[in-house]
Image (spheres, rainbow, N blue to C red):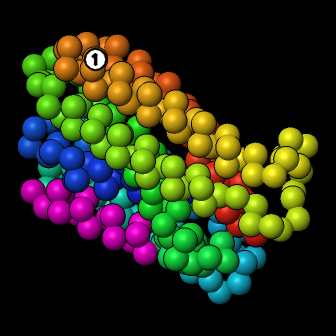
Amino acid sequence: MVLYETALGGLALLWLAPLWGVVRPGFFKLAGGTALACAVLAWLAGRGELAAAGATGRMAALWLGVFAAAVLVWQVLLYARVPAARWAGMAAVLPGLVAGWPLAQLSGRPALGALALLTGALFLGATMDGLLLGHWYLVDRRLSNRPIAALATWLVAGVAAALVSAALGGARGSAVDQSLSPLLAFPNLTVYLAVGLVLLCGLMASFIRVLVKGNSIQAATGMFYLAVIMALAAEFAAKVYFFPA
């Protein structure tokens, strides 16, 4: 789930943020390769359990595979310098969105499940793309601060969205599975943990915006490092109970 969210959010924000035509194509190869790796790993990690979850699970596995294939096609076109590569990258978002619906149905709460996936994708995508772009400034030193400032703003929006994702991740009154940790016996511990981590990411997002305005890109990238670690941990906590036992 977390890998899928990272791939979908990271890919979508490449087109929502003002990056194309501003940042050199090499960055899209870097970010696209990261999204591809996450999409492929999400498909490989989930296909076994999804295949055993009936027709809906098999449909989710199928669309996860289609999503990974679409991202791969985009990367091939990008490396081949085909002019339509940009549109292929945008189109690759669609199968990712479609895959979210059968995944959300498996949660037992289709509408809320879809909302949890989309908000988590925005959160993880903003942190991952921001981290990768911060490193890209080491390659393109003439790049203005506008792209990373835009992603810092998207991170603020992602933090707000992640609070929704965290709030939807409780145990829902079912029997508590303590196989991961006996601490899960505490009611809604994962929700409190996720919310706390998200709030820390919000604090870092405010620091990143200040650092970018002060032209301290390397320091902002360091903050993105911490934000990525905490964002992944927050989404893991939020999604522990996403699927019913």
The residue nearer to you, when weighing 202 against 179, is 202
The residue nearer to you, when weighing 69 against 106, is 106
User: Which image quarter is the N terminus in?
Assistant: bottom right
Q: Quadrant of residue 155?
A: top left
| 10 Å crowding of disc 1: few (<14), some (14-19), many (20+) | some
Taking the spot 62% from the left edge, 83% from the top edge, the residue there is 56
Does 85 sit left or right of 228 as displayed?
A: left
Q: Which residue is mark 1?
A: 211
Taking the spot 43% from the left edge, 52% from the top edge, the residue there is 161
Q: Position of residue 120 (x, y in %)?
A: 49, 53
The residue nearer to you, when weighing 40 against 184, is 184
Q: Is residue 89 magenta?
A: yes
**Main SS of residues in magenta:** helix
User: Which image quarter is the C terminus in?
Assistant: bottom right
Taking the spot 41% from the left edge, 18% from the top edge, the residue there is 222
Does 227 sit left or right of 24 as displayed?
A: right
Magenta residues span 83-98
